[in-house]
Image: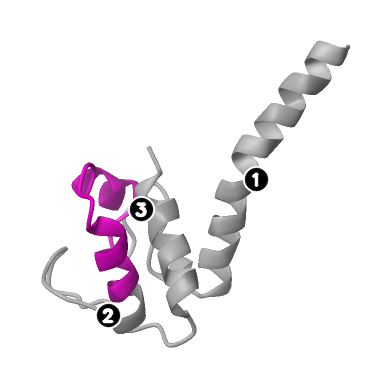
């Protein structure tokens, strides 16, 4: 019984941060154009993570794109700036996206 509780607690601890960041993405309307595992208007977050895997500068670059927008990397549709997101939130979102597998 104790072992089962430990396993459940460990699983909750691992998934809680990911869920919290997904909740942040939802609250900031990121999920209107992106999904974790499929392309919508923009690329899936897993595709973004794959594209920038191993790039030490990716989190800062993506955080800037979240706040200021960008274009040309994923096709003709530009990503608009998101004025609802501050720098700390943008970095948290970018780090979460880059950690997806």
Mark 1: few/some/many CA within 10 Å (<14, 14-19, 20+): few
Residue 67 versus residue 7 in the image, above or below: below
Q: What residue is disc 3 on?
A: 45
Hey, which quadrant is residue 99 in on the image? top left
Circles 2, 3 touching at the beta carbon (< 8 Å):
no
Q: Earlier in the sequence, mark 2 or mark 3?
A: 3
Q: What residue is disc 1 on?
A: 16
Q: How many marks?
A: 3
Q: What residue is disc 2 on?
A: 69
Q: Is residue 41 visible?
A: no
Mark 1 or mark 3: which is in front?
Answer: 1
Mark 2: few/some/many CA within 10 Å (<14, 14-19, 20+): some
Residue range of the region highlighted in magenta in the rendering:
41-65
Q: Earlier in the sequence, mark 1 or mark 3?
A: 1
Left or right, 22 with respect to 80, comes to right
At horizontal 54% and vertical 57% (from top left) the residue drawn is: 22
For marks 2 and 3, give the CA distance: 16 Å
Which secondary structure dominates the residues rendered in magenta? helix
Q: Earlier in the sequence, mark 1 or mark 2?
A: 1
> Which of the pair 39/80 is nearer the observer?
80
At horizontal 34% and vertical 61% (from top left) the residue drawn is: 40
């Amino acid at each position: 019984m104790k072992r089962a509780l430990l396993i459940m607690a460990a699983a909750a601890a691992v998934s809680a941060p990911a869920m919290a960041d997904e909740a942040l993405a939802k609250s900031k309307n990121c999920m209107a154009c992106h999904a974790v595992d499929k392309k919508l208007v923009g690329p899936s977050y897993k595709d973004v993570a794959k594209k920038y895997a191993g790039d030490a500068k990716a989190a800062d670059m993506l955080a800037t794109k979240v706040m200021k927008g960008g274009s040309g990397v994923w096709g003709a549709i530009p990503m608009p700036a998101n004025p609802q997101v501050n720098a700390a939130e943008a970095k948290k979102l970018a780090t979460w996206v880059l950690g997806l597998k």
